[in-house]
Amino acid sequence: MRRNRDFIGPAGMGGLVSLWGASSLIQSVQRGTIVIAALGTTNTATITAVNLANTRLVYDGHTCVTNNVTAAIGNAYVQLTNATTLTATRNTASTDTVTVAYEVLEYAPGIVKSVQRGTVVNGTPATITAVNTAKSELDYLGFISTNTVPNNNQTTINPYLVLTNATTVTGEQALVSSSTSSYQVTEFF
């Protein structure tokens, strides 16, 4: 018997390959788009059921084709509503459609420790259950705004998010009174 076995990497217990077999650490990936139709503010997409505790949503961007789009009309965010439903939302209905792209990644058990989802509204920090920031990832899932400035002035409205510390997600934006940003914090083992 070998002494001082370190159990990490390929030598220790055969590494991750022996723990999960020769298969991927990702059980499934689902991709698609959600179209928010003209005069609508929300729409959903149905996916094959996932275990929410092991699933990460990736926002792949959005588009709104029009000449006079404003942040209130043309921006959107996406959320994982339940195990089979994604919801895309924009602030204001218009005659223009918005298309939001997404990926849903379901990991094998034992990869994801926790997933927390929510929104940062008007720059007010969101409080989450404490995570290990060295093993956590913050995903920005888009934003909506009440701002009616044409999108050629995006620098005043586009927010970003920061995992400020173990319990806080902060949103930053020049016009903090006009946006809601969707986020997800995934903590890995």
Image (tube, rainbow, N blue to C red):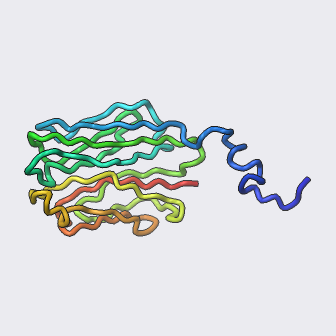
In the image, residue 26 above or below residue 147: above
User: Residue 46 location, x and y as percent?
Assistant: 34, 31
User: Residue 103 location, x and y as percent?
Assistant: 40, 42
In the image, residue 17 above or below residue 184: above
Q: Quadrant of residue 165?
A: bottom left
Q: Quadrant of residue 109?
A: top right
User: Residue 137 location, x and y as percent?
Assistant: 46, 58
In the image, residue 34 above or below residue 121: above
Residue at horizontal 27%, vertical 65%?
124
Residue at horizontal 28%, vertical 37%?
34
Residue at horizontal 51%, vertical 43%?
54
- In this rendering, would 132 be left or right of 168? right
Residue sitting farthest toward the right: 1
Number of marks: 0
- In this rendering, would 109 be left or right of 136? right
- In this rendering, would 44 be left or right of 64? right
Residue at horizontal 12%, vertical 58%?
147
User: Residue 153 location, x and y as percent?
Assistant: 14, 63
Q: Quadrant of the C terminus?
A: bottom right
